[in-house]
Image (spheres, rainbow, N blue to C red):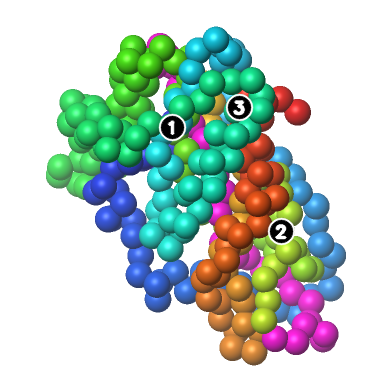
Amino acid sequence: MFGQPIGDTRAMKTNYQPMRQLLTFFLVLVLSACAATGPTSSLDNVITSNYQLPDKTKKIVILPLQSPYAEFDSGKEPVVTQLYGSLIKAGYKPVVLQKENYQRIWAEETEAVGGLYDTKTGGYRKAAFEHALSMLARRIAIDTDCSLVLAPSFAIKTVKDSGEKASWDGVSRRLMLQGSTDSWRWSGTSKAISLELIAVNAAGQFQFKTYGGLVIPYVVDLYESKSVIRTDMFSRPEEITEGVNLALLPILGS
């Protein structure tokens, strides 16, 4: 239930794809008369039935944000900064766990559960990940007197395009295009980045997994029918704020 692995260096190496593979995530452009669609809430959100708001007298610990591709690392700092700021504004006491401390204790917890991958098949052991994260949260809670541990990561989502926009995980973003669009209408699919947020309480119990749409990381060249990665993908603070606050809805409320 917790989601994908967080902070495991082997997982990062296994999932990393070179730039030429990333560039295959281009939009499928076709002539179309579809109108733009509005944003919808994420259908992937999961909130446990016994979820309770964090205690404002205690800390909320934010783990280092994990990214599946190095090309997206420029978004780590602004997203974590916004997570911190949104929680402060809501009256909470967030702290960000230092990367070195996180890597050390996460390695110890994953080793304690026998690793996150099956030694024979190489398959991902979801139950082992959930147990390791639960133990990590309990361990952090003892050291920091926190009520909640947040594990943020970037999730790559397949989104539908229609008209001039793509909508996913509660947001609607304008497609980034190069070349004349005067005679074009388009539809199809593309890739987008969302913030995935997993919350575990001080007792090691899963609380929620939520998503907030962030950015479309590619710009499409209509003449060449291909896409290239954007160097300015995290340059719009209003998009970061919107996506982060959507992922934080169980804490912030509407």
Under mark 2, the amino acid is Arg
Q: Is residue 25 left or right of residue 108?
A: right
Location of residue 188 in the rendering, given as x and y in whole percent from the top left corner: 67, 68
Q: Is residue 4 above or below residue 171?
A: above
Question: In which quadrant of the rendered image does the N terminus lie?
Answer: top left
Q: Which residue is mark 2?
A: 173
* Secondary structure type for disc 2: strand
Looking at the picture, tell me which residue is in the foreground, 133 or 102: 102
CB atoms of marks 3 and 2 within 8 Å: no
Q: Which residue is mark 3?
A: 88
Q: Residue 80, which numbered label?
A: none
- The answer to which quarter of the image holds residue 50 is top right
Q: Residue 96, which numbered label?
A: 1
Q: What residue lies at 61% left-to-right and 60% top-to-bottom?
A: 235
Q: Is residue 58 left or right of residue 66?
A: right
Location of residue 214 in the rendering, given as x and y in whole percent from the top left corner: 61, 51
- Residue 6 in view, yes or no: yes
Q: Between marks 3 and 2, how big is the CA–CA gap?
A: 27 Å
| Mark 2 Cα shell of 10 Å, populated few (<14), some (14-19), many (≥20) | some
Under mark 3, the amino acid is Ile
Task: Tally the numbered discs.
Answer: 3
Q: Between marks 1 and 3, how big is the CA–CA gap?
A: 12 Å
| Mark 3 Cα shell of 10 Å, populated few (<14), some (14-19), many (≥20) | few
Location of residue 80 in the rendering, given as x and y in whole percent from the top left corner: 51, 41
Return the disc, 1 or 3, that comes first in the chain's sequence.
3
* Secondary structure type for disc 1: strand
Q: What residue lies at 66% left-to-right and 24% top-to-bottom?
A: 90
